[in-house]
Image: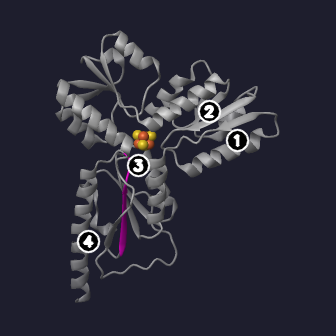
Amino acid sequence: MISEDKRPGRLNVANRRPEIILAEERGFCFGVRRALEIIEAAGRRYGRVQSLGGIVHNLQVVKRLEEVGVTAVKSLDEVTTPVVAITAHGVGPGIPAEARARGYEVIDTTCPLVTKVHQAVKRLADEGFFIIIFGDPNHPEVRGALGWAGNAKTLVTLDWEEIRKIKPLPHKIGIVSQTTQPVSLFSNFVKAIMDWVFPRPVEIRVINTICDPTIKRQQDAVELARQVDVMIVIGGRHSANTRHLAEMCAAEGVETHHIEVPEEVDPAWLRGRSRVGVTAGASTPDWIIEAVVRRLEEVADQVAAEAGVLTGD
Ligand code: SF4
């Protein structure tokens, strides 16, 4: 459980069947869907394909890919198949070139919205900016984006105070974001840097590279969290964008549960509740969302039946 419902005045209807409400935008984003389609087709065509890093942070999807011959390796040095796939997270420009030079066929599934981050980083580097990436330094998308910075000086951080340690402060500062970060956090990060830097004569260029599907998914999740008694967020425990969704729902003060599979649904979450919201991270496939919703509907029936017995309805 991420949090308990702390909102004042929430009325729960004990003897009514809880309603299950799905966020409008949820689950696979178009970038992940596209990458999976390309890689699954390649697996079927070539029999064996290795991707550089995991395709998605979702164990159930990884298992399904293994069934069509797609597995992940950490680096080019580990590749043992003639075909290598670049994931939706993208890579630096040197990797596909190196793979081809080693004789591998390269299948590139980089999300077009990640390519926009690459272009932004390259543009800033070409124009002599010090580049700040608002993101997780260990995330593959961020590592790939850094590859486009060439020789430019860079900093990857989620904490604006890191900028204070840079001495001397560069005259040109470019800021971009990992595509899946929460918009409000990126905006606060940028504002804090501006406030600290502005007494000095600097040029700051901010490019909002958070992708549209992420923005929409976050907006829909928060909107739904404000209308329900409990939120269920479905997605891999290692999926950063799923964790962000759960944190944003919890921040609205609603009881929030981050789960991976339907078996984790606890009937206690639905007892005495009238509205249950459901959303899912960008790496969560439709079949898992459907299975969780089926389980929630079953539990809602049980809970309503129990309440009927208890109240004599
Ligand atoms: Fe592309 Fe956004 Fe999906 Fe990442 S989260 S794969 S950038 S659409």
Q: Please, is residue 69 above or below residue 210 in the view?
A: above
**Majority secondary structure of the magenta segment?**
strand
Task: State which tag comes first along the sequence, 3 or 2.
Answer: 2
Q: Quadrant of the C terminus?
A: bottom left
Which quarter holds ligand 1? top left
Q: Position of residue 271 (x, y in %)?
A: 31, 73
Q: Is mark 1 within 8 Å of ligand 1?
A: no
Q: Residue at x 46, y 77 (%)?
A: 10
Tell me which segment is drawn in magenta.
274-282
Q: CA distance from mark 3 to mark 2?
A: 24 Å
Disc 4 crowd rating (10 Å Cα; few below 14, some 14-19, many 20+) is: many
Q: Amino acid at mark 4?
A: Ala
Question: In the rendered image, which residue does mark 3 sit on?
Answer: 242
Amino acid at circle 2: Ile
Mark 4 → mark 2, Cα distance in angstroms: 47 Å
Q: State whether label 3 is within 8 Å of ligand 1.
A: no
Which callout, 3 or 1, points at the residue further toward the start of the chain? 1
The way the protein has been coloured in the rendering is one colour
Q: Point out the tag, 4 or 2, that comes first from the N-terminus.
A: 2
Q: Circle 4 sits on which residue? A: 300
Instruction: Name the residue carrying label 2.
Output: 132
* Left or right: 284 as drawn, with respect to 229: left
List x then y, in percent, for residue 35: 33, 36
Which amino acid type is shown beneath numbered disc 3? Thr
Q: CA distance from mark 2 to mark 1?
A: 11 Å
Between marks 4 and 3, how big is the CA–CA gap? 24 Å
- Tag in front: 1 or 4: 1
Measuring from the top left, give residue 69's x and y in whole percent.
19, 29
Compared with 109, 2 (above or below) is: below
